[in-house]
């Protein structure tokens, strides 16, 4: 009897030699004729072909929009070695910086349009350093525009010269009241 190691074709670590198998008795020998044997026709054996037959119920439909390769069974093949990136979508919201133009005006109607689209606008009134009455007029105009849009206007500095107008659907945390990098450090 052959042990487990020899069954798998490995040497026995204990060094036991395999027991020889009993040999079947040899058939009685037939007399050998000196004549040439009759020709034997050898036909090639047909190679087994692997045919894949599926019922229509067994096949899964290919997902809509599938452009990748398919397996021989008709299944979608996901090649994980191929990296395909989707085109990056353009952002729909932005952070905008607005300062007075050459004539010291703030265009509130264009700001209102951007705020309604969801953009957050930072208005800088610092260039109007020596024009306190003009700064107050710009603040009133921005306050009126904020009321039209339904948003609050926040001061980002102690002098109320840097104002933030959040866009629609933008959440502003008003509990902590921490601005700048100081809270992060």
Image (cartoon, rainbow, N blue to C red):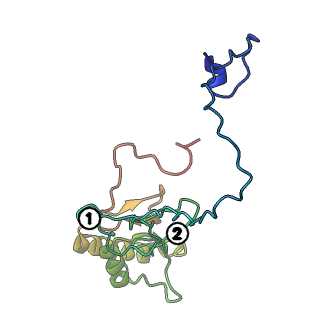
Quarter of the image with the C terminus in it: top right
> Residue 40 at x, y = what percent?
61, 62
Mark 2 lies on a secondary structure that is loop
x 48%, y 84%: residue: 104
Q: Nearer the viewer, mark 2 or mark 1?
A: 1
x 50%, y 77%: residue: 99
Report the disc number at residue 85.
2
Mark 2 or mark 1, which has the lower sequence index? 1
Report the disc number at residue 55.
1
Question: Residue 89's image quarter?
Answer: bottom left
Farthest residue, direction bottom? 103
> Residue 42 at x, y = what percent?
60, 64
Report the disc number at residue 108.
none
> Residue 74 at x, y = what percent?
38, 68
Quarter of the image with the N terminus in it: top right
CA distance separating discs 2 and 1: 36 Å
The total of numbered circles placed on residues is 2
- Which of the two residues, 35 or 124, is positioned nearer the viewer here? 35
x 46%, y 58%: residue: 156
- Which of the two residues, 147 or 36, is positioned nearer the viewer here? 36
Mark 1 lies on a secondary structure that is loop
Q: Dot 2 surroundings within 10 Å: few (below 14), some, or many (20 or more)?
A: few
> Residue 22 at x, y = what percent?
62, 19
Q: Dot 1 surroundings within 10 Å: few (below 14), some, or many (20 or more)?
A: few
- Which of the two residues, 112 or 16, is positioned nearer the viewer here? 16
- Which of the two residues, 115 or 136, is positioned nearer the viewer here? 115
Farthest residue, direction right? 15
């Amino acid at each position: 009897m052959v042990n487990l190691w020899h069954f798998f074709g490995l040497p026995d670590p204990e060094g036991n030699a395999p027991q020889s198998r009993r040999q079947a008795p040899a058939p009685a020998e037939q007399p050998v004729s000196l004549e040439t044997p009759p020709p034997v026709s050898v036909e090639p054996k047909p190679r087994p072909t692997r045919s894949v037959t599926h019922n229509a119920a067994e096949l899964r439909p290919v997902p809509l929009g599938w452009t990748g390769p398919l397996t021989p069974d008709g299944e979608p093949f996901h090649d994980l070695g191929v990296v395909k990136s989707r085109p990056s979508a353009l952002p729909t919201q932005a952070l905008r910086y607005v300062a007075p133009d050459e004539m010291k005006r703030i265009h509130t109607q264009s700001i209102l349009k951007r705020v309604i689209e969801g953009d957050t606008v930072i208005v800088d009134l610092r260039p109007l350093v020596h024009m306190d009455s003009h700064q107050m007029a710009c603040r009133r105009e921005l306050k009126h525009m904020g009321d039209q849009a339904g948003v609050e206007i926040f001061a980002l500095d102690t002098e109320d010269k840097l104002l933030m107008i959040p866009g629609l659907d933008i959440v502003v945390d008003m509990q902590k009241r921490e601005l700048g990098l100081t809270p992060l450090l």
